Image: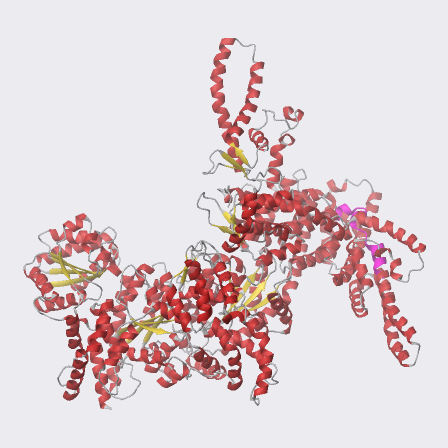
Amino acid sequence: MPPSTTPEVVENDLQPFFVLHKASSRIKDRTPTAQTKLCKRNKLSSSPASEKQLRGSVTEECDHHLFQQPQIEAFDIVWTKIESTIKDVLRDLNASIFHDIQQWVLECFNATKLLGEPTISEATRSFPVLNNTTPGKLFTSLVSTRNIEYVDDILTFEELGNFLKSHGFHVAMLSSLEFSLKNGIADCLKALLREFLGGAIDSADISILASWYREQVNYNKPLVLIINDLERCCGSVLTDIILMLSEWVVKVPIIFIFGVATTVDIPRNILPSHVLERLCPSRFMLGTPAERMDAIVEAVLVKHCSTFSIGHKVAVFLRNYFINQDGTVTSIIRALKVACLLHFSMEPLSLLHGRTLAEDQEEGKSSLSPETMLKYIDELPLYARNQMVDHQTKMSMAEGLSDLVTKQKLWSTAVLCLYEAGKYSNVRLLDLFCEALSQDLYLLRSSDCHAGYEKDRGLFSTNDRCQQYPVMQCGGFIGQIVRKVRDLSTGVLYQLIESWGKITADISEVHEKLETLRASVRCEEGKSPRKSSKGISRRPASKISVNIDKNPRMLNSQAVAFLDCLVRNFLRPIEGMPFHEIFCFKNVEKLQLVLIGDPRRRIQVDLLEFHKILKCSCCSKSGNSLVPSRHDSSIMYSLAQEHGDLINIHDWFQSFRSIVLQHKNKRKQTAKQSPSLKKRKDMNGSADQNESSIQARFCRAVTELQITGLVRMPSKRRPDFAQRVAFGL
Amino acid sequence: MEGENHAVKAVNVLRSRICDPKFIFFDDSPDSNYSKLKFMISSSVTEACNNSILLLGPRGSGKSAVLELVIQYLMQEYPDSISVIRLNGLLHSDDISAFKEIARQLCMEHQLVFSKAASFDDNSQFMMAMLKECGLAHKTVIFVLDEFDLFAQGKQRLLYSLLDAMQSITSQAVVVGISCRLDADQLLEKRVRSRFSHRKLLFLPPSMEDSQRLLMHMLTLPIDSSFPHDYAVEFNKKVQNIIEDRRFKETLNKFLNIDSAVKDLLRFLFCAVSHMDLQTGFLSRENFEIAFFSIQRHPKLEFLRNCTELELYMLVCMKSLEVKEQSLCNFNSVMKGNICCYNRGQSFSSNHYYINVYWLGFRHLIDLEEISFLNFHCLNISPRKMQVLIDYYPICEELLSFRILPNLLRLKQF
Amino acid sequence: MDKDKTPQLPVRMTRSSASSSNHIATAEVNSLEPLTINDLLVGGDPISLDDIISSFPGRSSQIREVVRLLGPLNSPMLPLFVYGGPSTGKTSIILQLFRHLNRPLVYSSCRTCHNQGILFESILNQLRLHRKNAANGYSTAKRCERPSDFVNFLREALTNVVNNLKKSENSISNKMTNGKIGNMIYLVFDNFQLVREWEKSSTILPLLFNLHDLLKMPEVGVIFISNTSPDTFYTNMGYVEPVPILFPEYTEGDIRQILLRNQLNQKLYSSFLDLVLHSFYRITNQVSQLSATLKPLYEKYCEPLNDKGKGVAHNSEMNLRLSTHIKPHISSALNEIFKISYISSTEVETQKEEKWKGKSSRSEQSKELGSLDFHMSTSAKYLLISAFLASRNPATLDASLFDSKGGFDNRKRKRKPSEKALERKETLEEEMLMKGPGTFPLERLLAIFQCLVSVAEDPSDNEEQNNNASGVQSGSGDLMSDILLQLSSLCNANFIFKGRSCPIEGSTRYRSTISEDLALKVARSLKFPLSKYLYRS
């Protein structure tokens, strides 16, 4: 180990940062890690309280727009819609796996029953049941949530618990907090009893559970114990509880469900071997966060459960935030919420949302005629309405809006079809979505499709008919998808076309295009048996072979043609259309500001370029040079730049002092004309007073820097060196 | 059939004797501890004076038993002028519970109602008052403090208040401390020791002769109506012969050399008696031999027997690492050692194991507590330093017993 | 009492019949009448000593010895100390013997009673024939925490019970039955080795060891059952040793018998054991482990037989075929010993999970070249890698590694690696590997992380660009942004341990304990050249 120079107060100087990062509303308070996690938990069940916080925080961001009541209402309407949609989507994702788990629990329960059911006297007795020779095995399922951040899955496990309860099982939910080393096994036993029995049981005694289970009402139902984050449980306590329960398993048929975030080796790492052999594990997989993400994007942003949508930049930002920062769906939902809120707060016309949405809900029709639009616009409050001057604009705007909505529908169908095709070349919807939204790519596509035409006219001798379609040329995911479609096998292609049929069912103009394709497919099918009969009647073999290898080609090329026209005609990103500002949120910077504080960087930047913040005359003219009138801590920090990661305090102080004193001397020259005697007196009076005050300022500045977590006080081993903590700028 | 009945009866008698200390330690020869103690206490009872005595001696040398005998005697001698308070250091080492217990027993003695809720001070004052009362009523309170040294831990308030109360003329109490620490009185604080009269009775382990006498005393059946006469005589004669027997003497010697307290001797007898053959219905020397071997244990060897080959190999590797003064001896290094020694040793070269197999053996060794870790702060086990708790040579002998000598030799030199 | 009449089964009975006959039992007994003295008996129909001996192969001598020491009816005894490795049949033999002798016992397992208060209470509850139920709110008969109270209560409870026993005995003594309970009562402490870990062990251990002397009741027998030998129970104050009885590990022959016990096709199984048992026995001699490991292997062994080897004409060439079939699996099974077997659990399950399970088991088997099957954000991945490096590489060599990449800006002035350090690095590496992962301060982690990000930026950007034309880029700026959050979540996932503060100066150090292949997986998922940064000796 090197001469280690390490944080003395790691806790204190790392806390504020991710608190800063996590919830911009809580810049001030320093919650320790666990609580931050907790507050993160609260975020996901977005209680009205947290919503208010969020709103408050956002009003901080954009306080120049003051909220109007109708806008808040509109936001509420839209967001509740979106949120409910998300909930449904997630539930549907988990439904199948929940069902499997429930089946599994039942099987395990029957298996344990086979070990022999003790009579009630045996069951409540202290010593083990005689007639089972093998040590009890606990059935355990490791539900791997496949995301290192377990925040998303708390909700999932709660739902699982409720699901199992609804099937009449006894369910206990424990979290890793009960498995702490200091309270030991007693604590988690108490929690267990509390969960099962309900009501406070003071003594942590497992025999209570046994006698409770033998009550008539409770008997003959499986007991399920859900622990949603195995990684964070203390191994020794877990060991104890498992061994104890395995002694009682015949009397109390308890079944474990562990939530495993990372790998299924976890139990092997945290439990000793003789415990592992008491477990009889099996494994379930929840959907990956990526899948959930796609599902949400599909439901909310592509299928437009509400008319709210986001611009390309925002989409890309969200994607990166998801991939790079923390891959939790929760935070993405929060991001969406913030975006939505910002949109409503900044865009006066965005009121139309709420109305349209309300309209949608009451009568099911989705396409908005200009008249209804017009109605809404008339209903707009004055401050919004006076933006549009006369009736003409109103009319045109109404037209445009309804047109916009319909366009959006087409767009989403196009994206969905592409996504359907993309499943074969596993393209993730998130990426596709970003690409489909980008305006410039759209322009580029349209341009090079013309180019493609010229090129195609140029070359005739191509035998691959697909090449003529410009989609093949355009890069990115779309191109990838289309290329994949080109060489799909026939059977798969049929399926694909069927699924397309489902998607485009209610969009007429796309559907009839698809119909033509389908028709050709059918004729293919129709042809194929005839072809085989031909094969029997002796035809030249070559023909047949050509025939055979051409037909699928035909099909593929038609499919590609279909995609091509989809992309060319309907894949118009919303930002390209008029009036899109009303429905579409594009302002990345604000969102970024809200979501990623990046505090360390921020602080350093502000310290170095302070004059951008406090716009005082002296500094603004003297750029970045060290002017004594600067704030002490910023002077200190920019001085610290010159040192390595170890700062010799004495030098530091000297340089600081010199800077500050040069300022003093200046002042002295200015104060020349005052009589010498008096001057000298107050000089040497002020001199030592200066010394002490400078030292004081120095110390204060250092402490400030330490508090901001940029510098650490000298360690015991190196009394004369301070240490830089923060890198990266 | 009925011979068996006799036998069962005999066994029962012997076992109840063994488990009954009063029977064992009763000898009223004038120089026995019994007589001395009896004299001391009874004199202090009759002269109505305070007294304090320490009974010292190794565990299971019958201190408390003798005391019980004495108290029993006194009880029937002076039935109404004695009350006994028994405390045990294991249970009442902390003052609060001690005083509580004293109050409880006093209440029981004098048919008073004992309130659990009484505070520490109430109890202590109550005790003082009771002492005065008893003093006035010429009733001697005998405090028996078993595990005396445990009372000497902490602030010794109990001892101090007791002994201090005994300084006054009015009170009339005897404090008898029982301890297996010969330096028990050195543990006392100055203020306590100054008030303590340093009478000690030393209980020594029995000599060879004594133990033989004890054996006779224990094992001879009573010649009375309880057993048919000839059976009893026969039985006693056999016992006589066994005890006279030279080889038996050797066995007994060996046993006494290892642990010589009376209780240990009793354990020996207990095993022997319980091995008695009920068909014949007589003790035989073999019973004693068996008992001897079943009591003499070599725990390390037993556990080495329980080891599998793999674990023995690992042990040898750790040992050889220690012998080579290797700086770090942990799972990883042992892994390397194992691998190289297996590659040398033919026996395992057939199948080469992966780490988790070694891990299994390793865990088992830890569970058997043949190896232990030196530092516990580290979270994961494999890099922890550890030490082997067994000598090298037993391990080698075990390996020899596995008939894999060549490997053993190789291991020795690496 | 009908609890005695309830059809209790002899030990070795097939599961099915057990459950069936017990149904009747539960049906009739569910009415809760107050407990009687007979609930202290093990109950069940009488079992002869020979049955017990035959049902526990290789244990006859121990059984006989225990019986001898327990002695005939109404004969007092000294405390016994039964010890031996796990799953050597200590507990069940004792219980069976009490069932055979039909004497009352108070059994308390120190695992179930995980501290002294609960131990006391459970003993007292049993003695006072107290039954917890909803009516009394599952409360105990007597709250008692202190040893002193416990001994008092225990004494009075015991005297009660013993008097009852004597009374009942006098009442039934005239009719000559073996249903005689006798007037002894036995306290059995199972898993006694656990008491040593209790927080009050220093006081509770000598108390329990001296319990027999404390009570001074000849009608009470005390039996300790422990995994570890008596000499691992060191107490600051000695005690009169109880009579030791060792249950040694089973020999190979015993294990063979035990495994053969409830097999359908004895001959087939024994031939199977001939093949495999010895090599397994060299690794472990614990029955539970062996049976767990051999079960799947046996199924493999039986695969060639069409009908699971029930009553096959068993002959030599068949034998040969099977052995050749099984040979390759043995060594793998040897190394699989003691993994969690997801495969075993699949059989119980529906087809749908079959797929999952298949996947998982495969990922179990093929550690190499598996891809990361859980989601981590990119910055977390980089952080993990840098933590791995930080605890794998000696810190003195950081500079030589990362300066060459130009990763470190000159602010990080580490000593230039002297050739001394360079030639020392192999030995260092050796030791590092031996000592396991080293610890590192937060700074070092951050520094390495930053330089990794700065190095990996450009390639990642390129591939981002060419696979996705929509100008999506992963700026390292926002990679850097919330490292500390990532760090905390990595700590939560047990990838990085927050070690205790180092002795020289009170400051937290971290330690990454991820296995190398996991690190490699992560690196692969980032297309990050990890091996370039690793020292290999």
Residue A567 magenta-highlighted: yes
Q: Position of B300 compared to C460: left or right?
A: left
Quadrant of the rendering where the C terminus of chain A is positioned: top right
Residue C262 in the image: x percent, y percent? Answer: 48, 83
Q: Position of A162 compared to A570: left or right?
A: left
Q: Quadrant of residue B40?
A: bottom left
In the image, C143 versus A469, the foreground residue is A469
Residue B261 in the image: x percent, y percent? Answer: 21, 67
Residue at the spot 60% in from the left edge and 79% down from the top edge: C325
Picture layout, residue A109 above or below residue B9: above
Q: Quadrant of residue C90?
A: bottom left
Q: What secondary structure do most residues of the magenta stretch adopt?
A: helix
Is any atom of residue A525 visible in this view? yes
In the image, B121 versus C358, the foreground residue is C358
Residue C122 in the image: x percent, y percent? Answer: 35, 68
Residue A246 in the image: x percent, y percent? Answer: 46, 70
Q: Specify start and end residues of the magenta stretch as a single range.
A: A562-584
Is any atom of residue A199 visible in this view? no
Q: Position of C105 compared to B83: left or right?
A: right
In the image, B31 versus A222, the foreground residue is B31
Specify the farthest residue to the left. B47
In the image, A666 versus B76, the foreground residue is A666
Q: Position of A441 compared to A18: left or right?
A: right
Q: Which color scheme is applied? A: secondary structure
Picture layout, residue C227 above or below residue B380: below
* Mark count: 0
Residue B279 magenta-highlighted: no
